[in-house]
Image: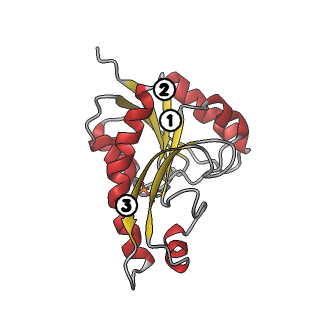
Amino acid sequence: MSGRRKVAVLISGRGSNLKALIEADQDAYAIALVVSNVEDAPGLAYARAAGIPIFAHSHKGLKRAEFDALVDAQLRAHGVEAVALAGYMRLLSPEFVARWAGRMVNIHPSLLPLHKGLDTHARAIEAGDAEHGCTVHLVTAELDAGPAIAQARVPVFPGDTPEALAERVLVEEHRLYPKALAELVRTL
Ligand code: GRF
């Protein structure tokens, strides 16, 4: 048996970071479960193709803490030791955040602490930033505010559109996230 740490990846949509995490050399971690709060999230196809168990369940009609408790029960049932948020578009309940403190990371498309929240690429352009990028950080109660564990930078070019900049950043996200997740689980 390998000593790989069992991780869960939580998604809501496209899942390109999930794909990168699956395709990376998983010597430090094994993806034991993919969770989606959107039952037909396109990214689930990557989990299906890789034979990874899926828990896809809508949050609609449930209180935040109730939904998070359902997810937590699934994580426990699959022996999950760390959680990677990858385009998971749900705020987490304080209970869930506390339960996974130090073991849950998120990838955010900006050089945090710059540009927390949404529309980061347009905001980087509007602000006249010379550089932009992505950050992997530990998840704490405050949105996009936990300690950063890794960053990657890209230049912002004159005349950049949010779409072009997003694409440039996404390439870096896909390189950064598997490395940062591996680093995190090695410390557990
Ligand atoms: C990425 O840009 C990530 O940084 C942000 O949401 C986007 C998710 O993309 N948190 P994908 O679903 O991984 O393709």
Res 80 label: 2
Say which amino acid is labelled 3.
Answer: Leu
Identify the residue at the far top of this view: 1
Can residue 125 be seen in this snapshot? yes
Q: Secondary structure at mark 3?
A: helix
Q: Nearer the viewer, residue 142 or 62?
A: 142
Q: Quadrant of residue 24?
A: top left
Residue at 60% from the left image edge and 31% from the top image edge: 100
Q: Is residue 4 above or below residue 164?
A: above
Tell me the distance, in whole angstroms, between the alpha carbons under discs 3 and 1: 20 Å
Say which amino acid is labelled 1.
Answer: Val
Quadrant assignment for the N terminus: top left
Q: Secondary structure at mark 2?
A: loop
Say which amino acid is labelled 2.
Answer: Val
Residue position for label 3 = 170
Q: Position of residue 171 (x, y in %)?
A: 32, 59
Q: Position of residue 187 (x, y in %)?
A: 45, 26
Residue position for label 1 = 83
Q: Does the beta carbon of the residue at mark 3 sit less than 8 Å from ligand 1? A: yes
